[in-house]
């Protein structure tokens, strides 16, 4: 099944419904592998890459990926690692190899006015609570490496758009969240880069 339209999801505020199983990316999986940016981007929207880079680990962004309490990391929600074209509907830490390449994907509808993002929260070992104020620059794409000491960012992604690719700085735990909805809808998660990632 595909994610339902997301425009109504934020109108519900913090009310989310848990759905068992997986949700599919468009066309039943990750489309073609050659990035092709849309004509331009504005300060409030990142360039829209229409396809995933070869060998990239894809992380879907959607407020319909139900928040949960991760035993070590606390409240996470809105992000899901894609496997075989599917993202789990329940949030979980994003576990990848330290050598992985990562791209984020806004699983909202094309043309939606909702923009989602992933931006690093530097120099922390737990999520700031109850909210976090990202620097204004995090609304635009920045960086190409996910690390623990800088605010890398996808910028605000339009519906059905992929972010730029990111490399991982090495083994470690990297906290990140959505620039706009970190505190409003609990869109936050961790990337756990480990030599033995498990599905």
Image (tube, rainbow, N blue to C red):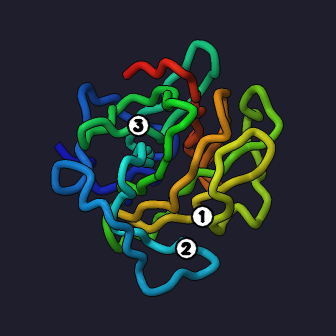
Q: In this figure, which residue is indicated by the disc labeled 1?
A: 155
Give the residue at mark 3.
81
Viewer-proximal residue among 44 and 122: 122
Q: Position of residue 16 (x, y in %)?
A: 41, 36
The disc placed on residue 45 is 2
**113 above or below 84?**
below
Q: How many marks?
A: 3
> Of 182 and 49, which appears nearest the observer?
49
Instruction: Specify whether residue 77 is in view.
Output: yes
How far is the residue under mark 1 from the one under mark 2? 7 Å
Q: Earlier in the sequence, mark 1 or mark 2?
A: 2
Q: Mark 3 or 2 closer to N-term?
A: 2
Evaluate if marks 3 and 1 touch, with contact meaning CB atoms under 8 Å apart: no
Mark 2, secondary structure of its residue = loop
Residue pictured at 33% horizontal, 63% vertical: 51
Where residue 53 appears, as percent x and y from the top left, is 39, 57
Question: Could you say where residue 160 lies in the image, as x and y percent from the top left?
Answer: 35, 63
- Residue found at x 26% / y 25%: 20
Image location of residue 114, percent across then percent down: 47, 64
Left or right of 109? Residue 171 is right
The residue at the far top in this view is 71
Q: Label 1: state its secondary structure.
A: loop
In which quadrant of the rendered image does the N terminus lie?
top left
């Amino acid at each position: 099944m595909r994610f339902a339209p997301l425009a109504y999801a934020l109108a519900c505020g913090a009310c989310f419904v848990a759905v068992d199983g997986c949700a599919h990316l468009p066309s039943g999986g990750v489309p073609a592998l050659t990035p092709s940016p849309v004509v331009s981007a504005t300060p409030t929207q990142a360039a829209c890459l229409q396809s995933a880079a070869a060998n990239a680990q894809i992380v879907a962004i959607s407020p319909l990926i139900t928040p949960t309490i991760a035993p070590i990391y606390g409240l996470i929600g809105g992000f899901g690692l894609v496997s075989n074209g599917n993202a789990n509907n329940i949030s979980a830490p994003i576990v990848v190899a330290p050598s992985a390449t990562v791209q984020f994907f806004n699983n909202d509808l094309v043309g939606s006015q909702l923009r989602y993002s992933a931006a690093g929260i530097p120099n922390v070992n737990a999520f700031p609570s109850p909210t976090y104020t990202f620097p204004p620059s995090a609304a635009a794409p920045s960086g190409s490496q996910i690390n623990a000491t800088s605010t890398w960012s996808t910028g605000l992604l339009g519906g059905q758009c992929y972010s730029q690719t990111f490399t991982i700085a090495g083994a470690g735990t990297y906290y990140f969240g959505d620039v706009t909805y970190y505190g409003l809808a609990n869109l936050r998660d961790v990337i756990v880069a480990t030599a033995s990632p498990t599905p």
